[in-house]
Image (cartoon, rainbow, N blue to C red):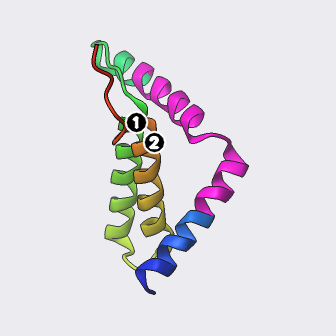
Amino acid sequence: MKRAEFLENVEKILENREKQYGSPDAVFEAIAQMISAYLTERTGIPVTVTKSDVAVIQIINKIARIGVNMGHMDSWADIVGYAACGVEAGHIGEPIEQG
């Protein structure tokens, strides 16, 4: 599969996932709060996980799955999708307001 075709497929997947699950911003925020609460309870140390952290965690999960099955196209597509969500959630590349 060529890169452009792959990226077009990923774009369609992202559109479908947003229709199914809602805004990645809201979903990643909910996941971040749940992981923060879990890690804080487990460690006894206050832990704050961000939406961008959630994207990284999901990418790590997909990389682990690729290690088991490198030919599974969904994992490759999900990595790109989670990277895009991470950029959006973390406002990466947006101008920084100077105070």
Residue 63 counted in the magenta span: no
Q: Is residue 58 above or below residue 69?
A: above
The quarter of the picture where the C terminus appears is top left
Q: Is residue 1 above or below residue 66?
A: below
89 sits left or right of 30 in the view: left
- Residue 48, position as x, y percentages in the image: 35, 20
Q: Which residue is mark 2?
A: 88
Which quadrant of the figure contains the N terminus? bottom left
The kind of secondary structure element at disc 1 is loop
Distance CA(mark 1)–CA(mark 2): 5 Å
Tell me if label 1 and label 2 are in contact, CB under 8 Å: yes
Residue 92 sits in quarter: top left
- Magenta segment, prevailing SS (helix, strand or loop): helix
Q: In the shown orientation, is residue 67 left or right of residue 74?
A: left
Name which residue lies at 42% across and 23% down.
38
User: Where are the magenta residues, as a range?
Assistant: 13-37
Q: Give amino acid for label 2.
A: Glu
Residue at 51% x, 35% y is 28
The 10 Å Cα crowd at callout 2, few under 14, some 14 to 19, many 20 or more, is some
Which residue position holds label 1?
91
In percent of the image, x 68 and y 45: which residue is there?
21
